[in-house]
Amino acid sequence: MKGSNHKALIPVFIAGTGILLLSFFFQSCSDQKKGDADLYSETLSFQTAPETDTLTASSVESSSSGSGGIYYGIYSPAEVSGIFGRKHITYDPDILSPVENPNIFSTRTQIALNLGVYGADLSYIQMFGSGDAAKYLDVILKLTGQLGIPGDYISGLVKRMDDNISNSDSLMQISIEAFNHINKFLLEENEEDLAYLILAGAWIEAMYITAHDLLNDNDPDVIKKIIEQKFSLNYLLSSMKNYYNDTNVAYVYRRLYVLKKYLNKTEIEFREQKIKIDKENKEIRATPENIRFSPETLNKIREIILELRNQILNK
């Protein structure tokens, strides 16, 4: 939203919207108690704490490893491996956005969304140590240039990326710094709408990568990963709503809101109802015991994610 105070966006990325999360979370719990049991024909039970994923070189590593908690904040494009997680997702380069695509994006909305998509793809590539990182870095640089971000704004980071192209840990950390620089530039230019579109694109791509594995194997841990994102989606939507009068943000918001309606048809039951919300690390500290959903709802969630992703890629 042009002309707004860009400083107002900074706490969204740093401190989060804890109060809004609490209202979303406890409203969800209340809705579950009133829900019709016939809506849930499948139940995943976790008698022991589910495995958690460690995000190498990620700034959210401390909140995502070893606690059994659910991260509800917004990952940057370089950190979205926290959604799909290496332990439960296989590497498939064919599902990534093709590197030839940047030339077909003509609007700033498309460019920003796809900058998030390619950032998420790079995170996926780096997690598995693939040799495709250089090609995706080139695409990201082209897209930043199309958004009007000066090359010298991240030139030092680009040099470091080239020097560390074979070191996935270092490359991930540098990628995080690069996207922080991009975000800072957009805030300074009062282009918060583009900053949110980048985040939305990365979130959608991470969900697409996760949901893709369900085509061949309904792994309970993958299903859990997807359904848990109802909390991070609430966070993203509550943040985007502040800029809803921007038509670009509103367009994406409305489509994500449809996805939210279906995610809200799922239920997460926490063990012993011992729930703590860590607002500093943006984490719900509670162990899921049962996750309930209908196969029809899960299929619809997957369809909407695929539709969103295809819209972004102009497919």
Image (tube, grey):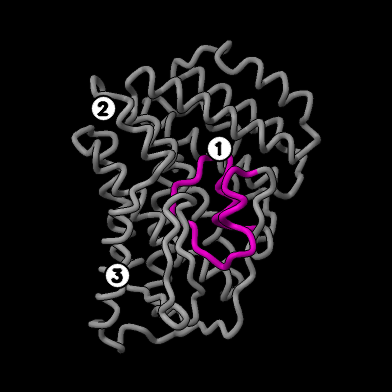
In what element is the residue under mark 1?
helix
Q: Residues within 10 Å of mark 3 (few under 14, many from 20)?
A: some
* Identity, as a three-letter code, of the amino acid under mark 2: Met
Magenta highlight on residue 237: no
* Identity, as a three-letter code, of the amino acid under mark 3: Ser
Sequence order check, earlier mark of 3 and 1 = 3
Outermost residue to the left: 245
Q: Quadrant of residue 201?
A: top left
Give the side of residue 119 with respect to residue 183, left or right: right
In what element is the residue under mark 2?
loop
* Identity, as a three-letter code, of the amino acid under mark 1: Tyr
Give the side of residue 123 with respect to residue 223, left or right: right
Q: Residue at x 30, y 88 (%)?
A: 37
Coordinates of residue 97 in the picture (x, y in percent): 56, 42
Of residues 46 and 212, which is closer to you in this image?
A: 46
Q: Residue at x 46, y 85 (%)?
A: 43
Coordinates of residue 140 in the picture (x, y in percent): 57, 28
Please, is residue 187 above or below residue 298 in the view? above
Q: Which residue is mark 2?
A: 1
Coordinates of residue 32 in the picture (x, y in percent): 29, 78
Q: Which residue is mark 3?
A: 28
Coordinates of residue 87 in the picture (x, y in percent): 68, 63
Q: Nearer the viewer, mark 2 or mark 1?
A: 2
State how far apart marks 2 and 3 are (Cα).
Answer: 30 Å
Residues at marks 2 and 1 touching, judged by CB atoms closer than 8 Å: no
Q: Which residue is mark 1?
A: 118
Q: Residue at x 48, y 16 (%)?
A: 149
State how far apart marks 3 and 1 are (Cα).
Answer: 32 Å
State how far apart marks 2 and 1 are (Cα).
Answer: 23 Å
What's the magenta region? 58-85
